[in-house]
Image (cartoon, rainbow, N blue to C red):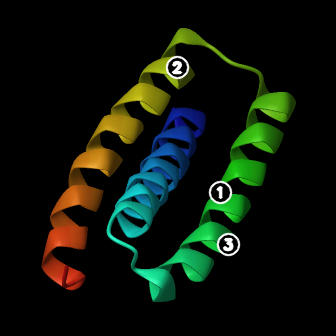
């Protein structure tokens, strides 16, 4: 179960960063692009290393998908709230 929670959290944060980054690019928010890119890089490497080490199971896949969809939803909300277009 711990692996599923780690995968959920890392995918949640990764997709949150990725969706936030898409909005930064779409709305030309240059100041947010660099820090968001580095956050994505750290999480991307963590997810790849995690799966390479632990392998994958249906529970890990479910945690990945669940974290991803919730991360995307939160990114849209936060971007609208924090970043002025």
Mark 1 secondary-structure assignment = helix
Question: Which quadrant holds the C terminus?
Answer: bottom left
Residue 61's disc number: 2
Asked if the residue under mark 3 is in contact with the one under mark 1, i.e. CB atoms within 8 Å, the reply is no
Spot occupied by residue 81 in the image (x, y as percentages of width and height):
14, 77
| Above or below, 71 relative to 24 | above
Left or right of 11, for residue 43: right
Question: Crowdedness of circle 2 by 10 Å Cα count: few (<14), some, many (20+)?
Answer: some
Label 3, label 2: how far apart the Cα atoms are: 24 Å
Residue 17's disc number: none
Left or right of 55, for residue 21: left
Spot occupied by residue 15 in the image (x, y as percentages of width and height):
45, 48
Comparing 71 with 84, the one in front is 84
Task: Find disc 1 in the rendering and name its residue.
Answer: 43
Q: Residue at x 21, y 83 (%)?
A: 82
Mark 3 secondary-structure assignment = helix
């Amino acid at each position: 179960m711990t692996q599923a929670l780690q995968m959920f959290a890392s995918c949640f944060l990764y997709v949150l960063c990725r969706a936030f980054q898409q909005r930064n690019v779409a709305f030309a928010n240059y100041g947010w692009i660099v820090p968001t890119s580095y956050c994505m890089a750290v999480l991307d490497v963590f997810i790849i290393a995690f799966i390479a080490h632990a392998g994958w199971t249906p529970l890990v896949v479910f945690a990945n998908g669940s974290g991803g969809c919730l991360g995307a939803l939160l990114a849209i909300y936060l971007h609208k709230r924090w970043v002025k277009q």
